[in-house]
Amino acid sequence: MNRTALLPRALLVGAIASLAAACAGGNQPPSPQVPAGPGYSSPITADQVVGKWGLAAFHRPEDAARTEQQAQQGCRQPYVINRGSSGGFMMYLADQSEPSEVVSKQNPPGPIYIGLPDEPPGGDGDREVLRFDGSVMVLKWLDKEVAGRYGTMVYVRCPQQ
């Protein structure tokens, strides 16, 4: 056979092979496109914090125990943490009237922070997690001016109703 006769056959074989490969792969779900991670871990999940919480705050460390008791009383008008649309959870940032989606973030083995997912751990807008055991969460604002106004926040999980 001459070369001009082989070219159409080669093209036909290539097209059939491409179609067969496409059909064979059609039964498998497409691979998910996972965006590149921010380079930190998220040790506290949305499932662990979504729910109703009593909330109170203190400015002096010696007031921490009393403030936890006050936060329990706050369940009459609870602070509600909902699930975010991107896997985080919804909380109010300083001086904001609408909640924003936040995540926990950590550069292991360092401290855990709660803040916006696209910012590195430990930024001025973050809160440091001083305590979290599933029923009590204590958060301290990193921004000194914000911390001076809001204090250290104590969240106590409200009983199921």
Image (cartoon, rainbow, N blue to C red):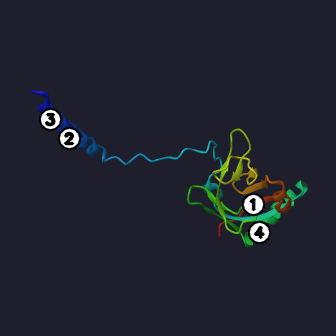
Q: What's the amino acid at mark 3?
A: Arg
Q: Residue 76's spot in the image, x, y percent?
A: 74, 72
Please name which of the two marks, 1 or 3, marks the residue nearer to the observer.
3
The span from disc 3 to disc 2 (Cα, nearest Å) is 11 Å
The span from disc 1 to disc 3 (Cα, nearest Å) is 73 Å
The span from disc 1 to disc 4 (Cα, nearest Å) is 9 Å
Please name which of the two marks, 2 or 1, marks the residue nearer to the observer.
2
* Sequence order check, earlier mark of 2 and 4: 2
Q: Residue 96's spot in the image, x, y percent?
A: 72, 66
The span from disc 3 to disc 4 (Cα, nearest Å) is 79 Å
Q: Residue 16's spot in the image, x, y percent?
A: 20, 40
Nearer to me, 46 or 136: 46
* Sequence order check, earlier mark of 3 and 4: 3
* Sequence order check, earlier mark of 1 and 4: 4
Q: Which mark is residue 155?
A: 1
Q: Which mark is residue 16?
A: 2
* Sequence order check, earlier mark of 3 and 2: 3
Q: Which residue is mark 3?
A: 9
**Alpha-carbon neighbours of circle 3 within 10 Å: few (<14), some, or many (≥20)?**
few
Q: Which residue is mark 4?
A: 74
Pointer 3 with pointer 4, Cβ within 8 A: no
Dividing the picture into quadrants, the one containing residue 98 is bottom right
Q: What's the amino acid at mark 1?
A: Tyr
**Alpha-carbon neighbours of circle 2 within 10 Å: few (<14), some, or many (≥20)?**
few
Numbered disc 4: secondary structure: helix
Q: Which residue is painted at 75% across and 60% down in the image? A: 155
Q: What's the amino acid at mark 2?
A: Ile
Numbered disc 3: secondary structure: helix
Please name which of the two marks, 2 or 4, marks the residue nearer to the observer.
2
The span from disc 2 to disc 4 (Cα, nearest Å) is 69 Å
Q: Quadrant of the C terminus?
A: bottom right
* Sequence order check, earlier mark of 2 and 1: 2
